[in-house]
Amino acid sequence: MKRLRVFVRENSRNPNAIAYTVMAIGALALPGIVQFANGGNGDFLVSLAADGGVYVLLAIGLNVVVGFAGLLDLGYAAFFAIGSYTYGMLASAQLISSPIHHAVHIPFWIALLIGMFVAAGAGALLGAPTLRLRGDYLAIVTLGFGEIVPRFFRNMKDWTSGVNGISALDVPTLPFWITGPWASTQLAIEHNFRFVSFNPTAWYVLVVILIVISVIGVNNLYSSRLGRAWMAVREDETAAAAMGVNTVNTKLLAFAIGASFSGFAGAFYGAKLSLVSPDSFSFIVSITILSMVVLGGMGNIPGAMIGALLLYSVLYYFLPGAPAQATALAHNLGMDWLNQSSPDGWPGIAEFIHRLQFIIFGLILVGIMLLRPQGLLPSRLRAQELKRGVHDESAVVTT
Amino acid sequence: MIGALARMPSTLRTFGGSQVSNLVGLLIVAGALALTLQHVLQHSASFFFQILIIGIADGTIYGLIALGYTMVYGIIELINFAHGDVFTLGGYFSLALFPIFGIAEGKAGFGYVIPLLVVAAITMLLCGVVNVAIERVAYRPLRHAPRLAPLITAIGMSSILEGAMYLWRGPNSLHYPDLLPLTRFNIGPVNIGVKDLIVITFALVLVVVFTLFINLSKLGKAMRATAQDRDAAQLMGIDINRTISATFFIGAALAGAGGITWGLYISSVDPFLGFITGLIAFTAAVFGGIGNIPGAALGGLLIGLIRAFSDSYFDSSWTEVLIFGILIATLVFRPTGLLGMRVPEK
Amino acid sequence: MVRARGLAVLIIATFVAFACGGSTGGSGSKGEIDIASDLPTSGADASSGMPTQLGAAFAVSRAGTVRGYSLKFVPYDDATQGVHDPAHGVQNVQAMISNKLILGMVGPFNSNVAKAEIPVANAAPLAMMSPSNTNECLTVTYPYCQAADGFTAESLRPSTVNNYFRVAAPDTFQGPAMADFALKAAPAGLGITKIAVWDDEETFGQGVANNFAKEFAAKGGTVVDRKSYDPKAKSDFHDFLASAKANGAQGIYVGGTSATGACKARGQMAGLFNPDIYYLGPDGIGDAQCITDSGSMATANMYATQGVADASQNPSAASIVAAYTSANPGSNNLGAYTFAGYDCAAILIDAIGRAIDANGGNTPTRAQVITALGQTKNFQGLTGVITLNAAGDQTTPTLQFQQVKPGSPGTWVFKSQFAVGGTS
């Protein structure tokens, strides 16, 4: 007990510890709270939260590439696409219509790992030719890659159904040793725990477990030799090489490991949505994930997670809900004329609010960078850098 | 696997600067040309020339936009993602200005040359002002921040501009009036539209005038000096902020002119037009050699031609892959582009 | 410390905000039954999705109750950034499925959204009633479906019980009807023998363009050029038009919708072609946006098919049509599929009523609603008398031809309509 108290006191001033605690409590409490608040009809919010978990996974992965190793990646959605398509092709009837004429139904849990390795392989493959590029050039190449990959999937009609995408994907099934031989009886503790679209809680639990695994894994990497090598490369590649860091392997591993999380996320996303469509991985997705990492605090794992949660809730919950709320508000205020569109160009308040969303998204991005460039919960090390501006060679350091 | 991949870059590195990479590049280009030629021969010559003209028209407009990217990158090493949307804004501004000057569909003729040019001038001015304001608000405070910061504000400004146009004129595409003469004439087997010629001439004149300006004027010299070494330029008495503002202004004015030309050429504008067009123009800037002004014009022209020929002689669904493949290949094998000079990595 | 605490507050606020969304509605005498809709109602697609949603909403509010249950209309928007998005549609369907009060949905509007949603709704199951989907492979497995579209009617229905129905005529009618019309000699048709065809690479556009091209070639015409363009990347059609002209095309058929830029190519034809060159398309181009995009080329030689009948040609629908237009005045509230949307909602309500009867006056299950929906016979709709077959199609859908009436601005006007044979 005393030990616990000491532990709590030691960490009560550590923002990361607080963030982890709050997120853990929130994650546990969320399903119960939303069901209670909506009178048992809160499933759609649990489902929305489970979708948000995908972005948390992606933010954790991109944080490895951008935050830890300092490699600017503007095409992260490409790996997300690779992960999703890997699952889509390996766990559906899709490959019947492909040249191999046989459906492949690999169980979710194995496909998850395959997706991870395929995405990691793609990360290393992309990383290899770009290793000698730095900074902006790397960003541009990843941007090009991010544009090419979804188009590639879109064009490979025989394998991916092209623009129609892959639907009716397999759902995960729990192995019998978890559900137990009593699975189909009343004795089963989790007899409702099935991965179907009308039971979002199962998906929610799954994504939370995936996130917990990822966080533990990334935290270990961060404090390992490799994690220190990443930071060394990020700070000064030449110096790192001089100190004996194998910069090539270090950067390749950053790309590969960062991409592997999007393989995770992609498989989960495909299975939950039951759809993989080439339009879901556009540039805006890469930018959104990058903004999440930057908003939360680059290089800090709980920061990236919080950034993902906040931006996700704004972009996918508040903004889409705003038009309907504005309509209801106008109605309640007796200003129904606001809801009607008129020929002189007023589109009705719902459409007007909808049209504001691009400006709001832009303002969020500009606002974060101007007001709090280090993010909400920055890594302490990076916060120092940003204040002093060591990255600006021309200002302080002479090269 | 990692080990094998790790060895790969060193081979690439030896490729990069050497004659071998040039040879490989030449072989690829030669192969592509031979393949194109084979396809071209299956169609008539007059069709070939028609596509050629379309490619040149698109290409000169891409060149106009690419100039802005390349200048801004040259001077503050920032990919100005909002630049493509400033281009679209040119179309929107001019559309709003037309009624004021009594210009409308079907009123083509010499009497409207002057009002059209006035609209173009005002549009260029407005676009320039918008871009300078963007630089002031979103980029200047971050000049000493890490690279990522201005990159994200640039994307944010792009979204704000798109949103502003979306809010202003609605989500649908707008029809851009046909103001240029629609007559076409034949030179031998070649069928040419007067419209195409005007578009190409207008864009080319702007590119040439601008290149001369950069090379000959005092401001141009200041820009080049700032691009080369900002601190040294400052020590020499160049007002860095003013020079950067001027760069943004000129780049945006050219993009605005590009927006008008594009509108006149393809008869429609929509709020998101600038995104993909901007990315393609940016590819053109990289292809020609980022930071290099004639390079951007040349890159734009080549990308326009590649696009037109790929769309009509090959499969259009692979055109984007081809263009972004060129982007990646340029940066990996020849980061200086076609005309760029090797600069040390800053 | 202060910052950390502030952060904690921020995180909690996010969770709370998530928690407090939505609320349950009021109750009727026996309870409440919800009818959802999934249509693109924001952005560029709003001009087609919104009037359809209004039509469905009007049907629900007009009915008010069914067998003592109060009815509520729950609209969803499947557009992302103003364009219909299959992924968004699936998320909507998943949300509908988790709302136990929703017994059926009106929609979706676009065939690619339907293709993504059917498997999810089918597994639940949830009844779908689309006013405007026309891709033929959604309901019937033709031999070419797997190869051309990558899906078949069976592959979309994992439970093997059909839950998807529609009122619009499939593209096996829409494409060929236009092809026949184009080929026929002057007074009865257009007398075109050479045509260039392009599509917007969507499920719908590609499918209808293929159907058109197949019929056109089979009946003796020549398709001189056949292209597919991604509307996000392609805005300059001069090369396609030049190729069409070089090959002697007398007209162009587009498989696409105005929201994906189907009529931008028409606008660029000015100068290159005479204004009397033909421009033909499916229901996707029969709206005001197409006329805007066409500019000076919005001539009388533009024709479009519509997959449903024109309700204003139906005398028995006149009073409801008048009631709708007085409740929703303005031309932008009246679209080609407004009354198809009305009919879909009305058919769904009718089916729910029969399902309640079959269930002894109690709230029916979703599966019972689907069964009742499949038994819809001789339903007196605004767009005609509707009987649904087992595959999900109308037995005798109606096809309508529209033509542009030039003016400023020009409008699409009714030309003719006729019933086409069913698919069952």
Image (cartoon, coloured by chain):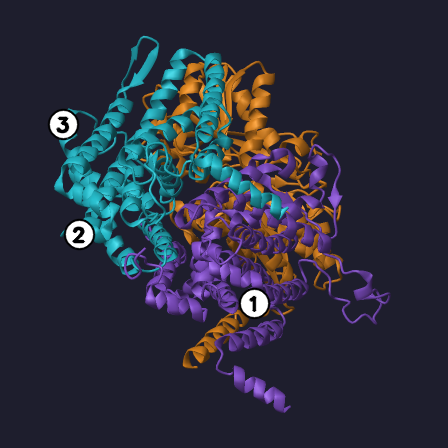
* Of marks 1 and 2, the one in the foreground: 1
Amino acid at pointer 3: Gly
Residue at image mark 2? B242
Q: Colour of chain C?
A: orange
Q: Quadrant of the C terminus of chain C?
A: top right
In this rendering, the answer to whether B291 lies above or below A326 is: above
Most foreground residue, C234 or A396: A396
Q: Which mark is residue A223?
A: 1
> Disc 1: which chain?
A
Q: Nearer the viewer, residue C79 or B186?
A: B186
* Residue farthest to the bottom, as pictured: A2
x, y percentage for residue C292?
35, 36
Residue at (56, 25) in percent of width and height:
C212
User: What crowding class fits label 3: few (fewer than 14 Cα within 10 Å), some (14-19), or many (20 or more)?
Assistant: few
Q: What residue type is labelled 1?
A: Ser
The mark tally for this picture is 3
